[in-house]
Image: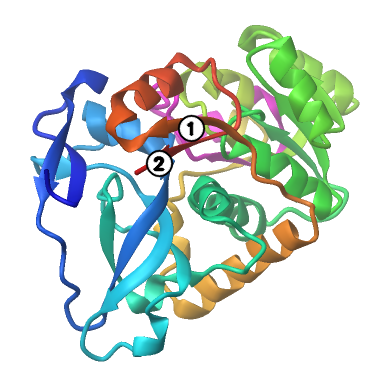
Amino acid sequence: MSDAWRMIIRQAGGPEVIEREDIALPSPSAGQARVRHEAIGVNFIDTYHRGGLYPLSLPSGLGSEAAGIVEAVGEGVDAALIGQRVAYVAQGPRTYATHGLEAAGRLYPLPDAISAEDAAAMLLKGLTAWMLVERVARVQPGQSVLVHAAAGGVGSILVPWLKAIDAKVIAHTGSAAKADRAKAAGADHALSAPFDTLASEVRELTGGRGVDAVLDGVGADSWAASLASVAKRGILVTYGNASGPVPAVSPLDLLHAGSIFLTRPTMFDYLEEEADRRTAAERLFGLIAKGAIKANIGQRFALSEAADAHRALESRAITGSTVLLP
């Protein structure tokens, strides 16, 4: 067997389409670094790529984030980078592998206090949380926010992040046990109500007003409840499709909901500039260093068991983040 290998898909489908492929040890081109992965993050977007919701050119790799050690660098990259601990978010699905190539300027050096597992579990989700809270919804102290899937990978970071900036958090989860975890993470209110009664509970908690922002990574199942929970001139941020894509929306829907704002962001549009990447990392690592945000790794799988990781993720029976270990 090769010392370097990856998990790929040759067709869209269920977890069973994920297979192992031996590869040559990748050589960095000019401006690139080769990272030997120590831990790889698993995110819901990986299931969208695998299943075809977000179509890929096939065959394709999977995975968007990893952490490890720089083993080699290409022309134009400072050799002092070799041996450093880093994490990165790939711009195309390819991190389910023992090694990865990335532009040196897009690597995030890891502070000593942050392990490879924690970085792989938190980088993409943490950068997503930064985008949602501080760049998209622009949440201010005292504002109220409804967080769906609050015990999941992104949600379990959103809740303490929002509390760190003195927002009022209403967490929603799929079970009472998960609601307890969201409450323990700092949520002011943690609900596990069915979606068809959620908005009325949110309105009751906010004196009938609704919330200033909804951060919704669930998608189709939560759409109506999210729309009905937003205060006048509030914002609904739909950023995930765990239950499928949201239905078609008419601008009149936004009028009738109270002149609300609606956006469907993608993280890379908010990390195009080096200054933004630096700011995002400083905010994320700073909150981790303060203990405001903690890695919540609920599941670990061997890299070769990526299909099992996807099954667990799609079952929605997991909590926190999931990592693969080469």
At x 62%, y 69%, the residue is 111
Image check: 10 left or right of 227? left
Alpha carbon separation for disc pair 1 and 2: 7 Å
Q: Within 10 angstroms of label 1, few (less than 14), some, or many (20 or more) residues? A: some
Determine if the magenta segment contains residue 41. no
At x 27%, y 76%, the residue is 72
Q: In this view, does 128 lie above or below 26?
A: above
The part of the image, by quadrant, that contains residue 242 is top left
Determine if the magenta segment contains residue 232. yes
As shown in the figure, which amino acid type bears the numbered disc 2? Answer: Leu
Q: Is residue 302 above or below residue 124?
A: above
Image color mode: rainbow
At x 73%, y 14%, the residue is 177
At x 87%, y 32%, the residue is 188
Mark 1 lies on a secondary structure that is: strand
Q: In this view, does 277 lie above or below 55?
A: below
- Look at the numbered discs 1 and 2 and tell me whether their residues touch, using CB distance below 8 Å: yes
**Which of pointers 1 and 2 lies earlier in the amino acid sequence?**
1
Mark 2 lies on a secondary structure that is: strand
Q: In this view, does 236 lie above or below 142?
A: above
Residue 208 is labelled as: none
Q: Give the range drawn in magenta.
A: 228-254
* Rendered-image quadrant of the C terminus: top left
Residue 130 location (% of width, % of height): 61, 56
Residue 232 location (% of width, % of height): 73, 38
Query: 258 and 186: which one is in front?
Result: 186
Query: 320 and 174: which one is in front?
Result: 320
Location of mark 1 (residue): 300
Is residue 92 among the parts visible in the rendering? yes
Residue 185 location (% of width, % of height): 79, 35
Is residue 233 among the parts visible in the rendering? no
Location of mark 2 (residue): 325
